[in-house]
Image: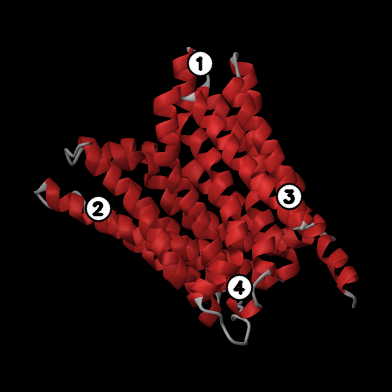
């Protein structure tokens, strides 16, 4: 079969590929529920029950993504050596351990000991997230084939964001009903369910052949990773400042802006998730970044809330396909034997982009107002767009 006919076949029958990917999406959804459930309840519990201040809250919140970032290289190596299923199962164990540690937070009489136990739980959650995300991506791509890598990334992303979005309010409701122990119990239950779904599925071992050193892999995928990092700054700006911007403008309905972003994000993935595999990652990334830039500029210039809502919608629609589009290009650039390492390195750039949002965009917002954060996000996305177009024409 020629490469062109193979590509056409890979682009066909998206419904069949979606059915094949559903178990992996369910695993990621349940796994990321363990991340989403404590998201909103954790800061409240640290402040009210443990009597800790804002610095302790910031430390606890930041610890998990920091551990996740540090875990990415090992997660990628594990996927290449033993396959994505092994990484997912180890990640599920880490997530379950985090829930067990959270359950013990209220047991010590000394709140400081309880907080230390909570930090251990955050570290275990970070380990679990790094392994579940990288393992889920590597496993699903190996199951459907590299020609459908973009589609696999689309469904894994939908499951991840859906779990985080649903987990926040669910965690608050559980804490109100049964305390933080109820949240911890739900985390353990979700992790165990993810493991039960994963266990019967066939393991797909990593491809044979020599594996490249991780730093060399980083060097091969950094252009796509840098584009993802730049695009994610706009996403971070919306997450951090959209509510404050609406408040400063005297507008109501900031929640609707977040819903518009999230709804457009999922809708674009459902409707156009096959585009990166069909038309090429670079081309789709360029179009997606252009839409994202337009949306962020609308948010920056909005004089009425309706324009801001439209900007949030366009930003979500544009950002939606950036991850799978750049991801398709990143995976193409490394041998199959190092695909897990490439995915680990690539996803780490997303972590770096979000981490940069705080100091970089925060300084812009403090100096020029909240809406300026969206202009800065548009500038970063435009840099990614220009770089993508330059590489495509070189």
Q: In terms of image quadrants, where is residue 100?
A: bottom left
In primary-sequence order, the first of circles 1 and 2 is 2
State whether residue 197 appears in this view.
Answer: no
In primary-sequence order, the first of circles 4 and 2 is 2
Which secondary structure lies at badge 1? loop
Which secondary structure lies at badge 4? helix
In primary-sequence order, the first of circles 4 and 1 is 1
Q: Residue at x 47, y 61 (%)?
A: 193
Q: Which mark is residue 190?
A: none
In primary-sequence order, the first of circles 3 and 1 is 1
- Residue 366 coordinates in the image, percent (x, y): 39, 27
Q: CA distance from mark 4 to mark 1?
A: 46 Å
Q: CA distance from mark 4 to mark 2?
A: 34 Å
Q: CA distance from mark 4 to mark 3?
A: 25 Å
User: Mark 1: few, some, or many residues within 10 Å (few <14, many ≥20)?
Assistant: few
Residue lying at the far front of the rendered structure: 394
Q: Which residue is mark 3?
A: 389
In primary-sequence order, the first of circles 2 and 3 is 2
Q: Which residue is mark 1?
A: 252
Q: Is residue 380 above or below residue 202?
A: above
> Along the line of sight, which residue is nearer the eye, 385 or 76?
385
State whether residue 143 appears in this view.
Answer: yes
Residue contact between numbered discs 4 and 1, judged by CB atoms under 8 Å? no
Q: CA distance from mark 2 to mark 3?
A: 46 Å
Q: Nearer the viewer, mark 2 or mark 3?
A: 3
Q: Which residue is mark 4?
A: 339
Q: CA distance from mark 1 to mark 2?
A: 35 Å
Q: Which mark is residue 118?
A: 2
């Amino acid at each position: 079969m020629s490469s062109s006919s193979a590509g056409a076949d890979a682009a066909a029958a998206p419904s069949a590929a979606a059915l094949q990917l559903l178990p992996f999406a369910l695993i990621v959804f349940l796994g990321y529920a363990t991340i989403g459930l404590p998201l909103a309840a954790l800061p409240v519990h640290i402040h009210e029950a443990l009597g800790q201040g804002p610095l302790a809250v910031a430390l606890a919140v930041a610890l998990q993504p920091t551990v996740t970032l540090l875990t990415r290289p090992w997660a990628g190596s594990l996927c290449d050596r033993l396959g994505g299923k092994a990484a997912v199962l180890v990640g599920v164990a880490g997530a379950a351990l985090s829930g067990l540690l959270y359950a013990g937070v209220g047991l010590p009489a000394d709140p400081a000991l309880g907080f230390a136990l909570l930090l251990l739980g955050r570290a275990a959650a970070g380990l679990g997230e790094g392994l579940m995300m990288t393992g889920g991506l590597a496993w699903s791509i190996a199951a459907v084939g590299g020609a459908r890598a973009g589609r696999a990334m689309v469904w894994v992303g939908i499951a991840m964001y859906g779990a985080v979005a649903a987990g926040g309010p669910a965690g608050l409701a559980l804490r109100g009903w049964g305390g933080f122990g109820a949240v911890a119990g739900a985390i353990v239950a979700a992790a165990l369910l993810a493991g039960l779904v994963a266990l019967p599925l066939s393991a797909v071992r990593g491809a044979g052949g020599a594996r490249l050193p991780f730093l060399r892999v980083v060097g091969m995928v950094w252009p796509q990773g840098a584009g993802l990092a730049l695009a994610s700054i706009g996403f971070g700006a919306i997450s951090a400042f959209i509510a404050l911007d609406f408040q400063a403008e005297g507008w109501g309905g900031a929640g609707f802006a977040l819903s518009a972003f999230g709804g457009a994000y999922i809708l674009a993935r459902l409707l156009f998730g096959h585009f990166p595999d069909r038309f090429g990652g670079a081309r789709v990334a360029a179009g997606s970044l252009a839409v994202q830039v337009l949306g962020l500029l609308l948010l920056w210039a909005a004089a009425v809330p309706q324009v801001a809502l439209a900007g949030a919608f366009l930003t979500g629609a544009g950002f939606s396909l950036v991850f799978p589009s750049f991801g398709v290009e990143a995976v193409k650039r490394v041998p199959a034997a190092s695909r897990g390492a490439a995915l680990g390195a690539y996803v780490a750039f997303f972590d770096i982009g979000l981490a940069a949002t705080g100091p970089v965009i925060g300084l812009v917002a403090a100096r020029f107002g909240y809406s300026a954060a969206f202009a800065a996000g548009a500038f970063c996305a435009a840099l990614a767009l220009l770089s993508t177009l330059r590489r495509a024409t070189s």
